[in-house]
Image (spheres, coloured by chain):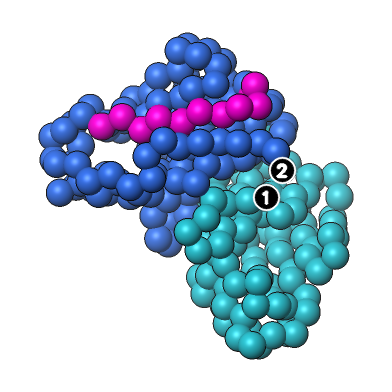
């Protein structure tokens, strides 16, 4: 069974803080993704990575960066958190570009 | 990514009735159309998907239909049960970019016993 684990389920951070959201998958998947989920807007792709140290911008990359130093780990970074980044963040992975995407449980981030 | 419009945003049905959710997209190159179900407080999970070389796919009580000419695809749930209550998301792959997906806004389905 594929497991995508997001280390923090609930976070509260202050405006201007640097925030790290960590994600680990245990199935040797090539591709990893970070999505943001907001009511009525569905899931919007922030960044994805198709290999170690490779990354590509999604639809809403502004204000975010990512890091993939190891195949199993994909980190989302908010350099200077703002209140409009309060949201649910979902990490996901897939074996290849034509394979099913598996999601983590999500990280609820509140920026105050 | 290319938008996908999903309707309705909420759907309330009586247990045993059918539920239909429709999505419309604009990118002619799209060829993969998955549907995800997200129960309250849980992760989205794939429930069914369809590729552009077929018009319909069925798995027990759920089915998906695809009309590439009209650029819309639909999820059909028959004989609904309380455990079908969830948020459902459609998605597609703009520009046939594999699983770099664009999602619809979601439909909250409530099945009343």
Residue holding disc 1: B46
Q: Secondary structure at mark 1?
A: strand
| Chain B colour in the picture | cyan
Q: Which chain is mark 1 on? A: B
Q: Judging from the image, what is the letter of the chain drawn in blue?
A: A
x and y percentages locating residue B86 in the rendered image: 57, 67
Please say whether residue A85 is visible from this viewpoint.
yes
Is A73 located above or below residue B52 in the figure?
Answer: above
x and y percentages locating residue B93 in the rendered image: 63, 40
Queried whether the magenta region covers residue A28, the answer comes back as: yes
Callout 2: 10 Å neighbours few (<14), some, many (20+)? many
Residue at the image point whose x is 63% and y is 51% from the top: B45
Q: Which chain is mark 2 on? A: B
x and y percentages locating residue B62 in the rendered image: 78, 65
Part of the protein shown in magenta: A19-29
Q: Secondary structure at mark 2?
A: strand
Residue at the image point whose x is 64% and y is 31% from the top: A94
Q: Is residue A74 left or right of residue B67?
A: left
A62 or A21, which lies in front? Answer: A21
Q: Is residue A53 left or right of residue A76?
A: right
């Amino acid at each position: 069974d594929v497991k995508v684990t997001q280390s923090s389920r609930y976070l509260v951070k202050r405006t201007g803080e640097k925030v790290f959201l960590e994600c680990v998958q245990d199935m040797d998947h090539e591709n990893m993704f970070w999505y943001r989920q907001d009511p009525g807007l569905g899931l919007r792709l922030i960044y994805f990575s198709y290999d170690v140290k490779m990354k590509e911008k999604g639809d809403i990359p502004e204000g975010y960066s990512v890091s993939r130093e190891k195949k199993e780990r994909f980190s989302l970074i908010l350099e200077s958190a703002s209140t409009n980044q309060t949201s649910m963040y979902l990490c996901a992975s897939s074996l290849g570009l034509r394979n099913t995407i598996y999601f983590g449980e999500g990280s609820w981030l509140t920026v105050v | 990514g290319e938008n996908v419009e999903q309707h309705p945003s909420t759907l309330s049905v009586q247990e045993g009735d059918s539920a239909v959710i429709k999505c419309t997209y604009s990118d002619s190159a799209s060829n993969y159309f998955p549907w995800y179900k997200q129960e309250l407080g849980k992760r989205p999970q794939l429930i069914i998907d369809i590729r552009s070389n077929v018009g319909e796919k069925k798995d027990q009580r759920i089915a998906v239909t695809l009309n590439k000419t009209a650029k819309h695809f639909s999820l059909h749930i028959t004989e609904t049960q309380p455990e079908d209550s969830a948020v459902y998301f459609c998605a597609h792959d703009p520009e046939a970019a594999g699983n770099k997906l664009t999602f619809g806004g979601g439909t909250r389905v409530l099945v009343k016993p």
